[in-house]
Image (cartoon, rainbow, N blue to C red):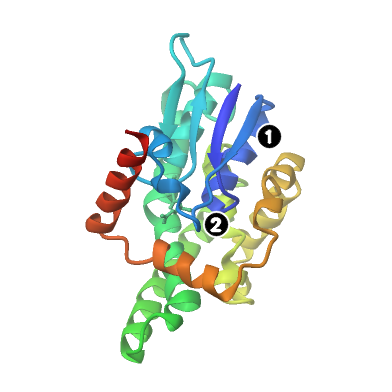
């Protein structure tokens, strides 16, 4: 059994899609990131980075004590090795997949996260319009560049890493499919190959199931006060704030 410490967001969907694709047994442990569960002592023990997703595999590769893993890229690589699916075991084909996994983790995810922040959230937080404009231009520009990188790759390959569907697709898709919603409704008109791939991956039953996991957790509309508290918690996390949360969590356990 695998515990998935999870909240329904693009980084969370990567893991549930892979678990649905491979048919492994799992159970969801909700981490309400808007309410601060990512700072609880028991979560920080498995993910010192106070970000979900993370997993605990009670029947890990090679046996032994339960194994915890954080970072969605590392989680999918582990699950691929555990099941022997969606990532070649050795050879050049393995590295073709892993380069796209690392590309997503270091580029598309963070840049889309920041573009989303400036386009959709920062207007409630910044008074200086020029700051908003600079941040939006910088990160939306990067997302445009990265969309072009995917489009070029998908113009000559059916999937991101080549001819076969792999963990690279499962890692990039949950972000790429949000391009119209987070960046601009008609953004995919300039990237026809990327659109073809988004639509094709969306048809997979495991993808449809995986992206719905935990939907009920966010169905309740938050009050204005709850929204404000959530923004305060999620944005501008400096080490001071995180250290204070960590210390409070440790005190509560002692
Ligand atoms: N690189 C990490 C990113 C994870 C991440 O950013 N998770 C967000 C939700 S999508 C989170 O837990 N945020 C909590 C916070 O900002 O305090 C991964 O892919 O696992």
Q: Is residue 60 above or below residue 54?
A: above
Residue at image point 66% right, 67% down: 221
Residue 177 image-quadrant placement: bottom right
- Residue 49: x %, y % from top left: 34, 44
Q: Is residue 201 above or below residue 136?
A: above
Decide if ligand 1 comes within 8 Å of the CB at mark 1: no
In the drawing, does residue 178 fall left or right of residue 75?
A: right
Decide if ligand 1 comes within 8 Å of the CB at mark 2: no
Q: Secondary structure at mark 2?
A: helix
Sooner in the amino-acid sequence: mark 1 or mark 2: 1
Instruction: Tell me how far mark 1 sits from mark 2, CA to CA.
Output: 18 Å
Question: Local crowd at mark 1 within 10 Å, few (<14), some, or many (≥20)?
Answer: some
- Judging depth in this view, the residue of 82 and 224 nearest the camera is 224
Mark 1 sits on what residue? 20
Q: Secondary structure at mark 1?
A: helix
Mark 2 sits on what residue? 175
In the drawing, does residue 212 fall left or right of residue 222?
A: right
Q: Is residue 80 above or below residue 243?
A: above
Residue 100 image-quadrant placement: top left
Is residue 43 visible to us here? yes
- Judging depth in this view, the residue of 168 and 43 nearest the camera is 43
Is residue 165 visible to us here? no
Quadrant occupied by the N terminus:
top right
Q: Is residue 20 above or below residue 174?
A: above
- Residue 89: x %, y % from top left: 48, 21
Residue 163 image-quadrant placement: top right
- Judging depth in this view, the residue of 167 and 94 nearest the camera is 167
Q: Are marks 1 and 2 in contact (CB under 8 Å)?
A: no
Residue at image point 69% right, 52% down: 215
Quadrant occupied by the C terminus:
top left
């Amino acid at each position: 059994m695998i515990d998935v410490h999870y909240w329904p967001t693009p980084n969370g969907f990567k893991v549930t899609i892979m678990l649905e694709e491979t048919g492994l047994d799992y159970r969801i442990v909700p981490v309400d990131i808007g309410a601060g569960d990512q700072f609880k002592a028991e979560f920080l023990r498995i993910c010192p980075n106070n970000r979900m997703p993370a997993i605990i595999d009670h029947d890990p590769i090679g046996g032994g004590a339960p194994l915890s893993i954080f970072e969605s890229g590392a989680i999918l690589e582990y699950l691929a090795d555990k099941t022997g699916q969606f990532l070649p075991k050795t050879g050049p084909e393995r590295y073709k997949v892993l380069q796209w996994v690392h590309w997503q983790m270091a580029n598309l995810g963070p840049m889309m996260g920041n573009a989303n922040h400036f386009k959709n959230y920062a207007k409630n937080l910044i008074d200086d319009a020029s700051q908003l404009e600079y941040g939006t231009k910088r990160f939306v520009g990067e997302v445009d560049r990265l969309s072009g990188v995917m489009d070029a790759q998908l113009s000559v390959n059916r999937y991101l890493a080549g001819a076969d569907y792999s963990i690279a697709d499962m890692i990039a898709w949950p972000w790429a499919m949000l391009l119209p919603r987070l960046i601009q409704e008609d953004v995919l008109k300039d990237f026809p190959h990327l659109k073809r791939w988004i639509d094709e991956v969306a048809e997979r039953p495991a993808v449809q199931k995986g992206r719905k996991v935990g939907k009920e957790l966010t169905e309740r509309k938050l009050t204005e006060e709850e929204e404000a508290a959530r923004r305060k918690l999620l944005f501008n996390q400096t080490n001071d704030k995180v250290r204070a949360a960590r210390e409070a969590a440790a005190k509560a356990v002692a």
